[in-house]
Image (cartoon, rainbow, N blue to C red):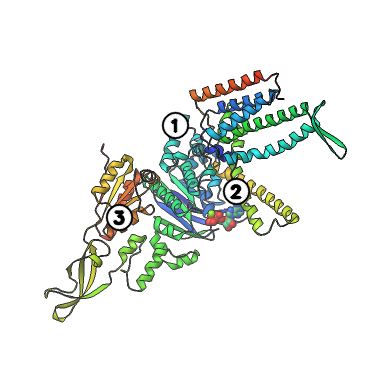
Amino acid sequence: MVILETKHLSFSYPDGTLALDNISVVIEKGKKIAFVGRNGSGKSTLFLSMNGTHRPKKGEILFHGKPMKYDSKSLREIRKNIGIVFQNSDDQIFAPTIYQDVAFGPTNLGYSKDKVEDIVNKTLEYVGLTHLKDKPPHHLSGGQKKRVAIAGIVAMDPEVIILDEPLANLDPVGADEVMDLLNELNYFGKTIIISTHDVNLAYGWADYVFLMNEHKVISEGTPEAIFMHDDNLKAAYLRRPVTLEIYEEIKRRGLVKPQCCPRDIPDLVHSLRSQQLLWAKVPSEVKEGDYINLGILYGDYAPESGYEAANCKVLHVHEDGLAIVEMDRKPYRAGSIGIYDTEYYSKDELLDIIDRDEIECIGAMGKRSKILAEGDEIYLHITAGVVDRSILNSLAGQRCLILTNGGMVGHALERIKDYMQKSGINIPVTVVNPNQES
Amino acid sequence: MAHILDDYAVLSPLRYKNNWLKIAIVTFGLLAGVSSNSPLVPFLIAICMSFATLYFAKVPASFYFRILAAPAGFVIVSVVIIAFFFGEGAKLFSFDVFGLTLGVSKAGLDMALLVFARTLGGMSCLFFLSLTTPMIELFSVLKATKLPDSFLEIAMMMYRYIFVFLDVAVGVKYAQSVRLGYKDFKTSFRSMVMLGTNLFIRSWEQGEKIYVSMNARCYDGKLILLDDKRPVEMPELMLTLAYFALVVLTFYFTRTVSVL
Ligand SMILES: Nc1ncnc2c1ncn2[C@@H]1O[C@H](COP(=O)(O)OP(=O)(O)O)[C@@H](O)[C@H]1O
Ligand SMILES: [Mg+2]
């Protein structure tokens, strides 16, 4: 379903600078969209047009199929449903305390005092900032300010959330937290639009990408379609994502399976081709292309896990019962991923589970879970890119546990199942403390 | 980041106490201090308030005495002058400087002590308030007064952006000084002017940006103002009353007494 659309949109600033030139884009509901372009390509201006701040010189904007109108009542409606998080949090957070700033939007929507209070408390809990609600903004870090700015928008419950350069000036941990939050919001049905010049971010995160340059949209498509083609990128003065760059390099050396486009590190690892060729004695009935089992490796020969099964693909059968085989090692003990819902957290239960399942690697996703784990001194092996790293570790035979809560549980499950589908590798995954009531 | 009084106030353990109680304590202290004729009362107030600031509000002593030292320095200078030039009558002691007789009379000394004590008492009251009650809390106090809301809203936004511009100003000043922008008087002057202009233009632009971002959240002329509901607790009340009683009694008994 199309939620937002621009048709032949052009806009110039009052001083005559042409900022948008005939832009036609269609944005689907519930998608993760990235507008990618270098500085000055018109992303911010486009965003400000989408929420009715800039009135286009030519062309129009359709929201739910209806052309945008510019009387104050229609604008209110638009702005309630299309929230925009500005690049610089200080432009947006103007109230003297966090609480008051988040309450600003809901108050403007005319909600009663109690309702505003309720919404603000829930939203702050959701973004993990309840403990800071009475602080003035200048006592917050950049990442915290960004989450306050997002909370201010989320509190108005818009259908579309637009974020202008959401990761600008954030440290890696702050950036991960913001992206976790965006993924969760998207999982609950919000359409998320971001602008960025970070090709790695756009490539790994987005469902659909628009490349912009010189005030125009120069190409659009799925991230694979856009970023595989150097012409697109060159025209937009952008570089290729690192994952693809690595993939291309190892492909040139014949180390990967051709024709896949890895979007993240698990994909990249999966695309690797096993390269260990060796001579082996094989029974006489074995043909080329068969798989044979050469037994179990352990100790120094099994660096990845306690035991590894050495399965080999027969490439070439030689005389004398010898053959050239390609070794494909699989950890003998399969790794697994457990997901622990911290909504129903109890320290003892968690420690029991860690003990019982012989968990070797614990990751936490979402602020709430991190705070809980830190509070109870549970050591976290992974705090960023948790799902990806857990997949990688479980592939290498480790037993992983992901601490998370609410919608992120479903999100993580889906993400892992996606990987299993794409790769055909089965990773045992369970929610280890399913909600007892339901 | 520039550390200022407000930062201590925001983090103060007394921040969430009833604002009116704090204001009452401070107002009482100021009034009692200036209306007393004996320096004992303001001294007592100074000691009590400093104790409260250091012990209850957990302000680091080194910081507290440093901020107290600046006004105290001025006061000591003026007190010396007062002691020498005020008051007639018999000198307690005197000496000659270039044929001029300088002396301190009893009245002069009394006066000097009183001024010193009052200033100290007043300062410690005000520091107590500003180290335990951040602006954020004062906004809800101001709301209870009959000030127009728009005045308050502007004040709130000014408060917010003072810190943004403080950071900008510190940054620009640093950028200027590393390029020798303050090497002598003339360049200093020029750099200062540039800093000022820059800040002015930036605040103008900031105004427009805030306007856009507020509109993006459906601004319709209302900001939320908090009103606090923080009951005064019994121990606080008892302590305050005990303090008041102590000051009043001292006030009463020192009406006619003078220290010397
Ligand atoms: N307030 C403004 N007045 C005039 N020109 C502007 C203004 N803001 C941006 N521009 C110009 O509009 C073009 C697009 O800018 P912008 O939308 O900010 O790009 P991006 O967000 O992609 O970096 C640029 O050429 C920029 O110089
Ligand atoms: Mg921009």
What amino acid type should be assigned to the residue bearing mark 3?
Answer: Asp
Mark 2 or mark 3, whichever is nearer to me: 2
On screen, residue B205 above or below B77: below
Per the image, the residue denoted by label 2 is B167
Q: Quadrant of residue B73?
A: top right
Q: Chain of mark 2?
A: B
Indicate the amino acid at tag 2. Answer: Asp
Residue B107 visible within the image: yes
Q: Is residue A15 visible?
A: no
Crowd tier of the residue under label 2, counting other residues whose Cα lies within 10 Å: few below 14, some 14–19, many 20 or above: some
Dividing the image into four quarters, tell me where ligand 1 lies.
bottom right
Report how far apart the C-alphas of labels 3 and 1 lie in the structure: 39 Å
For residue A242, what is the image quadrant?
Answer: bottom left
Depth check, front residue: B185 or A191: B185
Give the residue at x 38% y 54%. A385
Q: Chain of mark 3?
A: A
Taking the spot 49% from the left edge, 63% from the top edge, the residue there is A236
The answer for how far apart the CA atoms under marks 2 and 1 are is: 36 Å
Q: What label does residue A115 carry, if any?
A: 1
- Secondary structure category for the residue under label 1: helix
Q: The residue under label 1 is which amino acid type?
A: Lys
Residue A418's disc is 3
